[in-house]
Amino acid sequence: MVVRRLALAAWLCASAAAAHAGPRAEVIHWWTSGGESAAVREVAQAYRAAGGTWIDSAIAGGDQSRAVTVNRIIGGNPPTAAQFNTSKQFLDIIEEDMLDNVDELALAQGWDRLLPEPIVGVIKVRGHWYAAPMNIHMQTWLWYSKAAFAKAGIRKEPASVDELFAALDRLKAAGLIPLAHGGQSWQEVILFASMLSNLGGRELYLKVMRDRDQAAIQSEAFRKVLLAYKRLQSYVDPASPGRNWNDATALVISGRAGIQIMGDWAKGEFTNARQTAGKEYGCIPGLSAGSPYLIQGDVFVFPKTDDPEAIRAQKLMARVVGQPAVQLRFSQLKGSLPVRTDLDASQLDACAQKGMAILRDRARPLGVPEVYLTPDQNGALQDVLTAYWNTHMPVEKAQKSIASALRY
Amino acid sequence: MKIKRTLTPYAALLPMFVTVLVCYIGSAVWTLGMSMTASRTFPSRHFIGLAQYQRLFDNERWMLSLQNLAVYGLLFVLACLVIGFLLAVFIDQNVSGEGVLRTVFLYPYAMSFVATGLVWQWLLQPGDGIDSAVRALGWQGFRLDWLVDQDMAIYTVVIATVWQASGLVMALMLAGLRGVDPEIRKAARLDGIPAWRVYLQIVLPMMWPTVATILLLLSTAVVKLYDAVVAMTQGGPGTASEVPAKFIMDHLFLRSNVGLASAGAVVLLVPVLALFAPYAYARSRKEAA
């Protein structure tokens, strides 16, 4: 009897506590490395400060994490919120009508003019907003070692694709690894995207990636892009295949290599090695004054639910994610940029400030290939690009294979 | 009473029967169905006939994967059989410390393919591992860069997996060797037949059932080859060491194309059936005889 009464009391206490704790959000994400988990802790703290309860479900690895989210949505036990990349990864889930929209908040805050266009293009489907954007990564920065440039006698940052190749030649002549590269297919796609945007320009980029225009892929201009991409391969060291991106960054940090083309997450490696932008290393966002700025980022999506408590938790979450202070703090720790272009960037580092200024110019941001292509098309493109990079495939064949990869 | 007695074994078999029907045959049929739909992230019922198969055989990576699988399968099975047999014969000579050697040879099999792949990746990494060790020993011109070589990468996977699996083949072969009547060997020795001929022409043919079992085990290992490749080369450099199972996994999860992945899985089922059917047929004939 006593036991039963105690149990009842405990149950009452527990349920009272739960009712008191406000909306409960279970959040699936893959931010598990040092800087990333510090960044997501900021979001969790802000959520708690806003009166909610944050239940953290971190799953290492983006693929793994997304697979768990999709499986739980299908299984009828979805998380309150889940991370995706700003891409077509969650388009199928939207089309199955399994996500809640955040129209209310988007309209109130005026996301249409606040967010860069490529981000809007992904999260706004048929007039509804289906995700709360967290941050922006720019994928095709050029990072260079000032020591290596000095050794090779390069005095000026390259400002065109021709100047880039000239710099690479000088680095090679100085006995350095001109281009630090990790030979994994996704890193080869970054090199390709960098050449397509810098050499081909905005129009060709959109024609190939967004419109999948067969004539543009067969064009002479695109052929030149492919040749420039392949030419980069003559500047990497023979041990590059299979190398991780951060090992390639380490080559630049130590001054053994000259340049790496990589996303802004590479900045964390420089920071960890106690180097500062402008002093030991430099960052170049593009090879001409108006070159496209290829962005992607992370968003939270909110799986559909009937539970009013869960919906309340989702709404609170979307609001917290968009708070200026949370956006800034998160990006500072993760090395990304805040997604809202109206924020004061003066607290960010020199490279991020450069990026922020470009982001405000609405003519420059474009999405990375994943923003325009389905995961499937993107994968097929990746297969062709890595095969072209690694073998003696003639450029005509690469052109033909890309055309057929993007046809489906 | 009699009915009850005949029913009991069937009742005992029921769980296994249901498992086979639902988990194996059911899944296979479902996959076959999926392969004829336009499913992406989610299974869909939109029937598109054989279009996924058409696309599959139009895909260069898939064709290269099949080719790699053929090369890998042939070399892997042959090398395992030869090395396993030689090791078994070696231990069969009543060497001292047989127990220790047997354990040593069998030990790699206790490791997962992922661990095996990682260890061999370190060993074969150019500028590291064997490459730099041999150079440190004085051979300055020595280079071992198979792991990053387009044409050689698939052979590094063969090396690593043969190292892992030949111990098991040795154990099975040894059991087979021990099962051969010693009187036969004595008779052969009295006739003055050299040892190698005894093994090759008398003992080996008598071990045919063992060899068939080993072949079946190795062939299934070939078809499902995935983790060793992921751990060693990630299918690279480029697409040089891609295999069908990796293609299927990539499209199932990473690339959200359940339809195409299912088509690949069905195509992969064909060689398995082609290998297994003659074996099952031979066995059923033997039982009937």
Image (cartoon, rainbow, N blue to C red):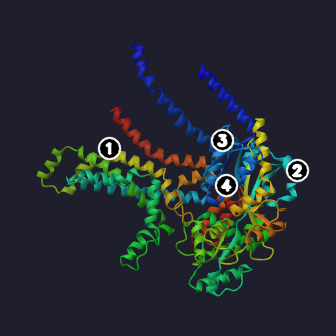
Nearer the observer: mark 3 or 4; the answer is 3
Q: Which residue is mark 2?
A: A107
The one of A207 and B170 positioned closer to us in this rendering: B170
Residue A12 picture location, percent across and down: 69, 28
Q: In which quadrant of the rendered image does the N terminus of chain B lie?
A: top left
Decide if residue A118 is in sight here: yes
The label on residue A72 is 3
Q: Residue at the front extreme?
A: A2
Tell me whether circle 1 and circle 4 mark residues in contact (CB < 8 Å).
no
Q: Is residue B191 left or right of residue B261?
A: left
Report how far apart the C-alphas of labels 3 and 1 lie in the structure. 46 Å
Q: Do the CB atoms of the residues marked 3 and 1 lie less than 8 Å apart?
A: no
Q: Identify the amino acid type marked 2.
A: Leu
Q: Disc 4 designates what residue?
A: A376
Which amino acid type is shown beneath numbered disc 3?
Arg
The label number, if any, that marks residue B209 in the structure image: 1
Q: Position of residue A109 (x, y in %)?
A: 87, 53
Along the horizontal axis of the image, is B108 left or right of B97?
right
Badge 2 and badge 1 both on one subunit:
no
User: Mark 1 belongs to which subunit?
Assistant: B
Residue at 54% in and 68% down: A241
Q: CA distance from mark 2 to mark 1?
A: 73 Å
Do the residues at discs 3 and 1 belong to one chain? no
